Image (spheres, rainbow, N blue to C red):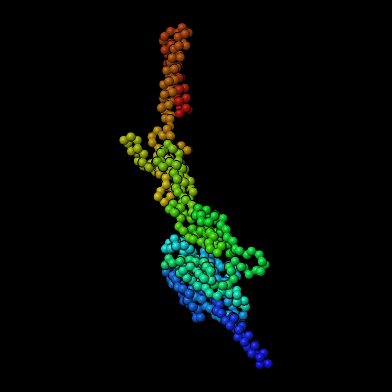
Amino acid sequence: MKKLILVLLVFGIFISLAYAGEVVRDVDIGVSCASGFDESLGFDNFNGSALKHCVKSVNYNASGTFVIDVYLGIGVISCLSGYESAQDIFEAYNSSANAGTSNTTSVYVCKKIATGANESSLVKDVSLSLTACSGNAESAGSFVDGDGRTIYHCVTGGTPLADDGDDDGGDDEDTCSDTDDGVNYSSKGTCSDVNGTHADNCADGALVEFDCGTNNLCASETIECDDGFECVAGECVAEPTCVDTDVSNNVSISGTCTDIDGNVFPDECQAVESDRRFGSKIDSKVEGEKGLVQYQCDAEGACVRVESVCERGTTCTSTGICEDVVDARKAAKKGALTGAVLGVFLAASILGACGLNKKTIMILALVGGVVGAGVGYYIGSVVA
């Protein structure tokens, strides 16, 4: 009996020692580490505020709650299904080239916690490091902090990220795709990963561009569009400009002005108020006179009115131009003179052929001239 008890005691001690190794119970990010947590590394957020990476490690027991996986979610809107995020979500740079710029991205510390898991599936250690992960530690993401330092996220043990917990023997490797073939500022794309879809979008006038980052997860960067471009519906497009087809405001050209909002203003005839000049004489201001209204672009991209009155001898037409006009009175006088000459000539020629005396021919020729003048005046007025 004593031998049996001794054997059981030794076996129990062996079992206890076999499972006495420390494993990670929890991971957090915050301005300070809570009781029971040890600081792994302190770093600065992009805005200079200090944060700490905190890890709580305890001895394994079969009924305890522990971390079975942890990774950095960079540029995502949430952690994977089944994962929860650490307390603080922070902003960092996804590359050294972006350090010190406005191109920041959100970073989540995503952890999967399970109760009663086998020790072999648990995370043994997790830390942030200023050097690349080494030994048994594997990289689970990296970022660049507010001081421009590359911070590596190193994990030892645990269930691989690609394992979604299903034991169907299939290939569970997560994939990532981007419809605009990566970073393409001039085309709106959609990045798809295990978290869902993430469309390029605009935020506060800047472009938020998604593409496939580390761990087959969509990552984002925020950039300002180049000068002359603006962010519209998830892409950088040329800013709208005001266009005037008649920049010199030529009164003989019918132009249009299109403002930055797409409103079109054609040159037109309207009632205007202006001074008219005829040679050295200046008429008093004409109220409501029908003149030419043209439009031109201003510095703000709007179309503004430019009013004028067509010069003497021209008039504003329905096509929005000043066009020469025919003076009806001059045309009528010219017609009358032409008609009178023709009337006298024709009357004299016809009557002379009839053998009438000169006096009679002269009288009747004058009558013909009067009739011809009247007909010519009428025709000249109608044509004008």
* Picture coordinates of residue 345, whole percent (x, y): 43, 14
The one of 67 and 339 positioned closer to us in this rendering: 67
- Residue located 47% across and 11% down the image: 350
Residue 203 on image: x %, y %: 49, 60
In the image, is residue 296 above or below residue 51? above
Q: Nearer the viewer, residue 160 or 80?
A: 160
Picture residue at 46% right of the left edge, 6% below the top: 355
Is residue 329 or residue 107 the one in the foreground? 107
For image coordinates 41% across by 25% down, the residue present is 333
Q: Quadrant of the N terminus?
A: bottom right
Report the quarter where the C terminus lies: top left
Q: Which quadrant would residue 290 be assigned to in this image?
A: top left
Question: Is residue 369 positioned above or below 238 on the image?
Answer: above
Residue farthest to the top? 355
Q: Is residue 17 left or right of residue 128?
A: right
Give me the residue at 61% from left, 64% from top.
173
